Image: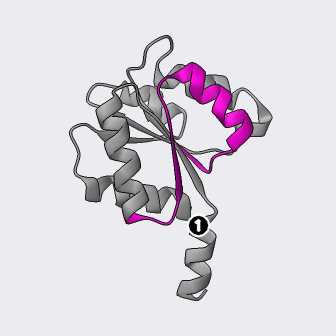
Amino acid sequence: MSQANKMSQQAVKTILIVEDDTDIGKFLVQALAAETAYHILLAANGVQAIKDVNTLMPDLLILDYQLPQMNGLEVYDHLHAQETFQHIPALFMSANAPLNEIEKRHAHLLKKPFELDELLQMVQVILDE
């Protein structure tokens, strides 16, 4: 596949970041938008993320584990209980998420704190799977 074709495929992919810390969320959106050709969106909590997924159909969820109202695993489980969303991969960001629970769901984990390059590399690997 040519580099131009690869870039045009990347341009149509959407990433939904679910992060309740406004500063972190904005940073992640800006960094991913600057460093990739993906369409990046932000939801401030799990309830908003579930609403957004219904209209956006993202190609990847980047979930903070510790969220208000429902944690990242609960968001993941709620979405993956529906056949329409079972194919959407997830990348959890957390310093203390239960690794065994994430592994059970065949999701990915990026331990906080992390470097931007780690995030970019992991996003690329997941979207290339």
Residue 86 lies, with reference to residue 100, above or below; the image says below
* Residue 81 x %, y %: 71, 26
Q: Seen in the image, is 64 located left or right of residue 5?
A: left
Q: Residue at x 44, y 55 (%)?
A: 123
Q: Answer whether residue 60 is magenta in the image.
A: yes
The span shown in magenta is: 35-61
Give 62 or 126, whichever is nearer the viewer.
62
* Residue 83 x %, y %: 78, 35
Q: Residues within 10 Å of mark 1 (few under 14, many from 20)?
A: few
What count of labels does the image hold? 1
Q: Residue at x 59, y 19 (%)?
A: 47
Residue 85 lies, with reference to residue 118, above or below; the image says above
**Quadrant in the picture for residue 11:** bottom right
> Which quadrant of the figure contains the C terminus?
bottom right
**Quadrant in the picture for residue 52:** top right
* Residue 55 x %, y %: 73, 38
**Residue placed under numbered mark 1 in the picture:** 11
**Quadrant in the picture for residue 82:** top right
